[in-house]
Image (cartoon, helix red, strand yellow):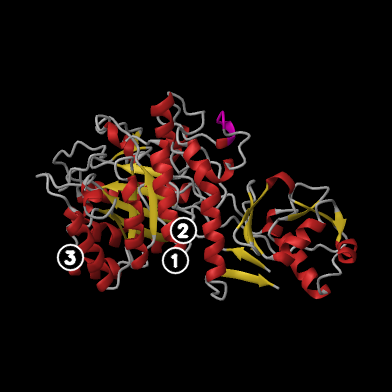
Amino acid sequence: MLWNHSFAFLEDDDCACSQSLTRIPKQVGIDGLRLQAGGDALKTIPVNSQFQIIARLDAQGSMAVLGLPGQRVLDVFANPSTVTDAMRRLVDLPAEQAVKVVQQLATLGFLQPSEQDCACASEDDCGPAVPSSPLTSWLHLTDRCNLRCDYCYLPHVREDMSSETGRAAIDATFRSAIANGFKQVKLKYAGGEPLLRFPLIVELHHYAQSLAEQHGLDLEGVVLSNGTLLTPAMVEILKSLRLRLMISLDGLGQHHDMHRRYAGGRGSFADVAEAVDLALANGLTPNISVTVSSRTAGGLPDVMAWILERELPFSLNFYRENELSASHEDMRLDEQKIINGMLAAFKVIEENLPRRPFLGGIIDRANLSASHTHTCGVGQNYLVFDQRGQIAKCQMHIRKPITDVHVADPLAVIRADQIGIQNISVEEKEGCKTCEWKYWCAGGCPLATYRATGHYDVKSPNCNIYKALFPEALRLEGLRLLKYQDDPEVVQKIVA
């Protein structure tokens, strides 16, 4: 049997998603073609004694779980063969089943015409890129915050974004969206702590909704919060505005408090946990963003069990050192500590496999849910508006603006900039060009790489961590698909 993996970006954290290269092909006509298995681009990882997960690690980006019949068919096409010839060697399988499996493997791109690079002759054959990339804007509503997290990159001055600046930022976002052909706009209401400016969130999102309706664009919004100020009334308003909520939670008890404390020094875990449960009790499921450092890696299994018990979407993001956090040497990523902590968390996931996909956020910025050439949307489809209306490429460079809300097309200015952070293609990074994972990893956070090496065109300093974790993450996804194989929302197709 073969299960097709349905890609979806369900996770959300403090970075913008890059545009996926993955295409969901239409049915492929295979009569008369000489087909061949994908060769070096195919990666297979055993899930158990009967099943293996198979992935195309090239720009196609397909993924599936193969049972014994699927493996048998794939083996037959190790060398170019027509379907008719293959059927003669598949006498151990019912003919109808064999043909269906061949068709499925061809549709997913695991079997390709031997004379061509792609089974699709044109974009019309392949269908559109999935998922389509939104234009994402980070709105820095305030620099104020009631917490003093050890890894924060902000000085926390008492400055807020005004209503006029916020509306101008949204106007600028929609101008760029229209000028550059985007069909969707995504707004991230952030800070500081954005719930300190909750009335402004409400005002700005109402305004964005009116612009989206006026221009026929889809609109998505998320509030990135520490959760400590959340109230039932806020939850109801977020639901009415169809705004999602992301809450930072780095561990249970002391493992969270090691990172995230109030200005007076008191730990924030109890209040954050209460906020998560409050949101759930009032019908809003928050996304949990976990920042992983060497200081807290040992607590990952406990927080993962807590997250899965509540059936929450999550992302595991590696700590990124910055100028304000550099003195905290115990947070720097020790490879073995991070690998051990992550694998222990994976074991908890294996014992409590969630229904929703998790590959988009399970290993830092290495998105395993779809192939892509850029780690994030910085310099591609991402705008960061500070409280004064200046625009930066990345929120961690918010004090290094490139332009402002008054330009006609701020995204064009951001894309053209050659001085600030350079989020280059993985195909241009030394150490990544020949890596089998390059289209799924994309080389890691460019800022983290630059801080560690002084270069943007080299592989991530976390490369060894990623490579140690990728195979196990894919195995977990294979187990998840098998567990929920009868759920149409998890599995698109089953071929027996």
Looking at the rendered structure, the kind of residue marked 1 is Pro
Classify mark 3: helix, strand or loop: loop
Q: CA distance from mark 2 to mark 3?
A: 28 Å
Query: Given the image, on which type of amino acid does mark 2 rest?
Result: Phe
In the image, the segment drawn in magenta is 427-431
Percent of width and height locating residue 441: 52, 43
Classify mark 1: residues with Cα within 10 Å, few (<14), some (14-19) or many (20+): many
Q: Is residue 11 left or right of residue 368?
A: left
In the picture of the structure, the residue carrying the numbered disc 3 is 231
The local secondary structure at tag 1 comes to: loop
Q: Which mark is residue 354?
A: 1
Residue type at mark 3 is Thr
161 or 259, nearer to the observer: 259
Tag 2–tag 3 contact (CB < 8 Å): no
Task: Kindly tell me whether residue 15 is visible in this rendering.
Answer: no
- Relative height, residue 467 to residue 429 (above, below): below
Instruction: Residue at 44%, 50% (x, y): give it.
Output: 343
Asked if one can make out residue 57 in the rendered structure from this viewpoint, the answer is yes
Residue 231 drawn in magenta: no
Is the C-beta separation of discs 1 and 2 under 8 Å? yes
- Is the N terminus in the top left, top right, bottom left or bottom right quadrant? bottom right
Work out how far the residue at label 1 is from the one at label 2, CA to CA, in angstroms.
8 Å
Which residue carries the number 2 mark?
358
Image quadrant assignment for residue 90: bottom right
Split into 4 quadrants, where in the image is the C terminus?
bottom right
Disc number lying in front (1 or 3): 1
Residue 219 in the image: state x and y as whole percent: 40, 60
Residue at 53% of width from left, 59% of height from top? 477
Q: Quadrant of residue 101?
A: bottom right
